[in-house]
Amino acid sequence: STGSAAAVPINAEFDIAYVTPVTLGTPPQTLQLDFDSGSSDLWVFSSHLPTSQIRGQEIYAPNKSSTAKLLDGHSWSITYGDGSGSRGNVYTDNVTVGGLMVERQAIECAQQVSSSFTSEAHIDGLVGLGFSTLNTVSPKSQLTFFDNAKGALDSPVFTADLKHKQAGTYDFGFIDKAKYTGEITYVPVNNDPGYWTFSSSGYAVGSGNFSASPISGIADTGTSLIYLPTAVVTAYYRQVQGATNSRSYGGYVFPCSATLPSFTFGVGEARFTIPPAYMSYAAVTPGSSTCFGGLQSSNGVGINIWGDLALKVAFVVFNGGTPPTIGWAAK
Ligand SMILES: CSC[C@H](NC(=O)[C@H](Cc1ccccc1)NC(=O)N1CCOCC1)C(=O)N[C@@H](CC1CCCCC1)[C@@H](O)C(=O)OC(C)C
């Protein structure tokens, strides 16, 4: 089997996150979920949430689904890199993504969400696509949608084709040759911490020479920007007039009028260049002449992250075979 679903940017201006329609239960309830390769819980806004914590999101009501079953005595609680979090109880039910159905998928129903989730009306929950070792359900941890689907897939892969200010796709079980050009460069994945961790072969700032120093980081569809070591980040912003690492704004900012260099990163022998326009993420507040950079330091995060900003200049294959690998191709 295979599946293919749209990845739609939630903001018309900036690619802060992408959501994908997912149908749950019988009759089908459709929610817009953020596919996140940086975590491994499938959780949703639910009928178990106090209405004060729901502001425009769609909810999943298990008691309205004839195929929902309570996973008695199980609970979950998760905190993300940005400090947001949620917790609740667990049901199993049918979950369908782009024509691909998994029966008895653990659906983690929120009983509490942090304020940043309540204020993000476009995200009705997450589909974790990290390794199932990271799943937070207790006392028995649960499998991700991908791990549950894997055995039935034509090939044990999912691919991400994210785009700037337009809908891309997540495909499951096949590699669509129409979505990329040239060859796919595969590199090993170290899934010990449960993430899609791989080694980038280096970077270049603008037309500068390529610095062939390996950078270990995770491919994270649920993170908006790129977070890299200080040496890389300072080398980049040294080329940006007026750039400063602002404590108040929580990262590197610069005058929106500044000329930005492109940023190139390597995967094996392949090279991927993020154009200057993508490297200025957004004005720090609407209308401000100060802009927030798309490249930020990983110092505060504790892990190097290749987020949506990097993923959207490539076609990326998350190969869940044995051993797992990750493939990057131009498009
Ligand atoms: C430095 S890691 C921070 C990362 N969060 C982010 O990247 C959030 C995503 C978001 C989008 C829309 C609305 C709200 C939040 N964006 C963010 O912090 N931004 C601030 C800087 O400007 C860009 C937007 C993160 O926590 N990613 C989560 C998934 C994420 C999905 C959206 C809801 C909040 C949770 C996950 O990938 C994760 O924790 O990864 C770990 C490994 C760092």
Image: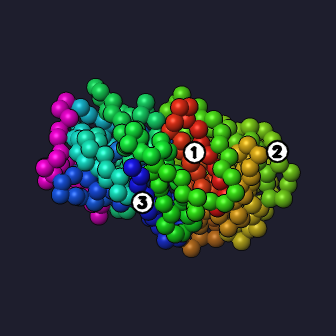
Quadrant location of the C terminus?
A: bottom right
Q: Which residues are magenta?
A: 48-73
Classify mark 3: residues with Cα within 10 Å, few (<14), some (14-19) or many (20+).
some
Q: Label 2, on which residue?
A: 211
Question: In the displayed structure, does residue 5 sit left or right of residue 179?
Answer: left
Which residue is pictured at 25% across the width and 48% down the height?
94
Determine whether 72 is above or below 293 in the image.
above
**Looking at the image, which is closer to me, 73 or 161?**
161
Three-letter amino acid code of the residue under disc 3: Ala
Q: Label 1, on which residue?
A: 219
The numbered mark at residue 40 is: none
Is the C-beta separation of discs 2 and 3 under 8 Å? no
Magenta stretch holds residue 65? yes
**Looking at the image, which is closer to me, 68 or 57?**
68
Q: Position of residue 27 (x, y in %)?
A: 17, 58
Classify mark 2: residues with Cα within 10 Å, few (<14), some (14-19) or many (20+).
some
Q: Position of residue 220 (x, y in %)?
A: 54, 46
Q: Label 3, on which residue?
A: 5
Which residue is pictured at 42% across the width and 45% down the height?
153
Q: Earlier in the sequence, mark 2 or mark 3?
A: 3
Which residue is pictured at 31% across the width and 50% down the height?
101
Q: Earlier in the sequence, mark 1 or mark 3?
A: 3
Classify mark 1: residues with Cα within 10 Å, few (<14), some (14-19) or many (20+).
many
